[in-house]
Image: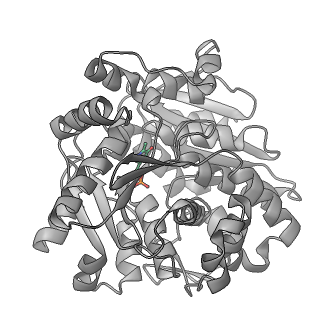
Amino acid sequence: MLYYSTNRKSPAVNFEEASIQGQAPDGGLYFPSALPEVEHALLKDIGSYSNAAIAYEIIKPYTGEMIDDTNLKRITEETVDFEIPLKQVKENIWALELFHGPTLAFKDIGARFMSRCLGYFLKNEQRQVTVLVATSGDTGGAVANGFFNVPNINVVILYPSGKVSQVQEKQLTTLGGNITAIEVDGSFDDCQHMVKSVFKNAERFPGLFLTSANSINVARWLPQQFYYFFAYKEWQDKTQPPVISVPSGNFGNICAGMLAARSGLPVDHFIAACNANDIIPHYLETDDYVVKRSVSTISNAMDVAEPSNFVRIMEMYHNETEKLRADLTALSVSDNETRNTIREVHNHYGYLLDPHGAVGYYALEKYLEDHRGKQGLIIETAHPVKFYDVVEPIINKAPTLPHQVSELMEKQKTTIMMEAKAEALFDYLLSF
Ligand SMILES: *Cc1c(COP(=O)(O)O)cnc(C)c1O
């Protein structure tokens, strides 16, 4: 399988090169040159497949000859070795819980897959690779955990001081070893700006082989298809496929779901559930793509102004917005609606949503009100405990801590403080 750049100026590359490069040199995103068809037998007998076996079947056409079967089996097994249950919340709504991994968010799946692929590609390299990434919260923890102790890889994570939740901070600052956390005296945008300047000036670091681990990397994007198939496996009524609502920020997750559907996974309709950052809902409604600055919300992992992966969705639909609208509805949900949803779903159904899942739930409920008789599921992207500062006052009680968190909170944080200047990061990397 080859991957071409959506900007069509850089040459097409194989999976190994696409995952080491991250973004194409022309600034585009890598996109598969052909969409594989899912085997009919897999869909028909999906109940008899393990999650690891499904993951292997789905990703194999994408990795092609770049990873041998034995290693691909090991990588997919390690990627999905925690439970991913589909829980019924009420008569027509289910939640696919993707938060039982080590850092309690769906990003564990993409980060675990990517780290193991890079580890495999680099195992015979003499040089060390430095993974440089900026995080607004969840990416940092998932990447740190995924790459911890992978030989030949050092990870440097920039995060905005005081602007991530306590759990998120512990997840990226307590591992040590090959993981370095840089605490930037500034915003997430500052962190991202610093990282981007390093990549723009890569020639100033001849001794470093730098790569990124953000969500546009194909090795993080493509494995996100797995759990849409896991959901289908658990889905009771196969004659009536689900409407799937995905809490969306950078649109990598929903784009993977739509890719799975293009490959043959039965899905009734997709909903991109956004918070107040509503460029895409506004675009699909009015045909006007109005660029705005990002605004802060209680579902902070989705505080993205311009979703990078939307170009991949347009690519899938050959830029035909009308066709896209037939498969995808986007809705913007306010913080108040999000809070009310957390409270009501908790009180009525005894199910505790995190703020991102609540955005997805609200959007799905609205859609189902207008489409009676349909059923749907939300992708529950994070554990509510990751956002207990938001959730606790709404339900008036503290969520129970899962073991991943109680052990973590005892650990010691280690960071390097840095002012929000690209030069400061340059100096640090040159002393590496
Ligand atoms: C990253 C994240 C999202 C947004 O996912 P995208 O793929 O960027 O759309 C949603 N919820 C949580 C909890 C996240 O960490």
Q: Residue at the spot x=58%, y=83% of the render?
A: 11
Q: From the viewer's perspective, is residue 238 above or below residue 430?
A: below
Q: Residue furthest left?
A: 286
Quadrant hosting residue 173:
top right
Quadrant position of the C terminus in the picture: top right
Pick the quarter of the image with the N terminus. Answer: bottom right
Residue nearest the viewer, comparing 97 with 276: 97
Q: Position of residue 257 (x, y in %)?
A: 46, 67
In the image: residue 159, left or right of residue 45: left
Q: Is residue 60 above or below residue 235?
A: below
Q: In this view, does 27 lie to the left or right of 408?
A: left
- How did the renderer colour the structure? one colour
- Write down the quadrant of residue 366 in the picture: bottom left
What is the total number of numbered labels drawn onto the structure image? 0
Residue shown at the point (58%, 23%) measured from the top left: 405
Please identify the quarter of the rendering in which residue 69 is found: bottom right
Residue 40 x/y as whole percent: 62, 85
Q: Where is residue 242 in the image (x, y as percent from the top left)?
A: 39, 66
Asked if residue 289 shows in the view, the reply is no
Residue 101: percent from left, percent from top: 62, 40
Q: Can residue 300 be seen in this view?
A: yes
Image height of 51 relative to 144, above or below: below
**Residue at screen point 64% across, 22% down:** 174
Q: Which residue lies at the image location 75% right of the left edge and 51% below the top edge?
A: 78
Looking at the image, which is closer to me, 375 or 149? Answer: 375
